[in-house]
């Protein structure tokens, strides 16, 4: 019995539609400019256009495109900082080992949201309980200081 044979594709046969070939930078600039005429708030397109202008030596044009994007990024980061300041830290009696404090903060936050049953209504309390859990964790070495629910409840009862 003979084995079936599989023939290799012919050389020179196009596997990709010629219309799918990548655009050169000038063509890409023209396409993005058209896109932005219809969708002027497309953040990614503006960044890409700035990058293309930069690669072509069009520094003034690049700055016009990228500067508003950078301002937007900085504005978002400033909002995060302001939001973080709205929730004061919880003092610890001593800082022995800070390893895992961020993970414990996140775990406390998620646990508080899950316990609330409606995550959107637990904001503030969830962050507070996450910070409480982290404040307890740093008071001892390694995994031996992972806080238990009782310890978090006691710290809440102490007015933290």
Image (cartoon, rainbow, N blue to C red):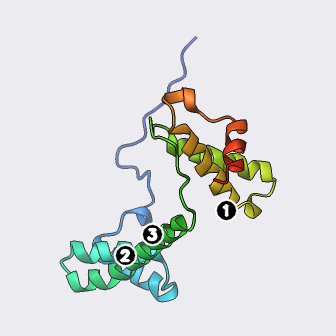
Disc 2 residue crowd, few under 14, some 14–19, many 20+, Cα 10 Å = few
At a point 40% along the width and 84% down the height, the residue shown is 33
Q: CA distance from mark 3 to mark 2?
A: 11 Å
Q: CA distance from mark 2 to mark 1?
A: 30 Å
From the viewer's perspective, tell me whether residue 97 is left or right of residue 119.
left
What secondary structure is marked by label 1? loop
**Residue 93: mark in rendering:** none
From the viewer's perspective, tell me whether residue 134 is left or right of residue 110.
left
What secondary structure is marked by label 2? helix
Name the residue that disc number 2 marks.
70
The disc, 3 or 2, on the residue closer to the chain's N-terminal end is 2
The outermost residue toward the bottom is 37
* Residue 152 image position (x, y, % from top left): 68, 42
Give the quadrant of the N terminus. Answer: top right
At a point 50% along the width and 39% down the height, the residue shown is 138
What secondary structure is marked by label 3? helix
Name the residue that disc number 1 marks.
124
At a point 79% along the width and 53% down the height, the residue shown is 116
Q: Nearer the viewer, residue 98 or 160?
A: 160
The image quadrant of residue 54 is bottom left
Q: Nearer the viewer, residue 142 or 30?
A: 142
Disc 3 residue crowd, few under 14, some 14–19, many 20+, Cα 10 Å = few
From the viewer's perspective, tell me whether residue 153 is left or right of residue 56.
right
Kindly indicate whether the residue at mark 1 contacts the one at mark 3 (C-beta within 8 angstroms): no
Name the residue that disc number 3 marks.
77
Task: Tell how many labels.
Answer: 3
From the viewer's perspective, tell me whether residue 91 is left or right of residue 120.
left
């Amino acid at each position: 019995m003979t084995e079936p044979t599989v023939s290799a594709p012919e050389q020179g046969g196009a596997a990709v539609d010629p219309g799918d070939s990548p655009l050169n930078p000038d063509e890409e600039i023209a396409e993005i400019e058209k896109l932005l005429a219809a969708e002027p708030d497309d953040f990614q397109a503006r960044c890409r256009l700035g990058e293309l202008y930069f690669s072509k030596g069009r520094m003034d044009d690049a700055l016009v495109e990228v500067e508003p994007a950078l301002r937007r990024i900085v504005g978002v980061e400033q909002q995060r900082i302001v939001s973080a300041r709205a929730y004061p830290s919880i003092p610890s009696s001593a800082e022995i080992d800070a390893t895992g404090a961020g993970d414990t903060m996140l775990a406390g936050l998620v646990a508080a949201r899950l316990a609330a049953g409606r995550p959107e209504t637990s904001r503030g309390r969830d962050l507070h309980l996450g910070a409480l859990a982290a404040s307890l964790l740093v008071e001892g070495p390694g995994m031996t200081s992972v806080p238990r629910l009782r310890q978090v409840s006691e710290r809440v009862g102490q007015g933290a």
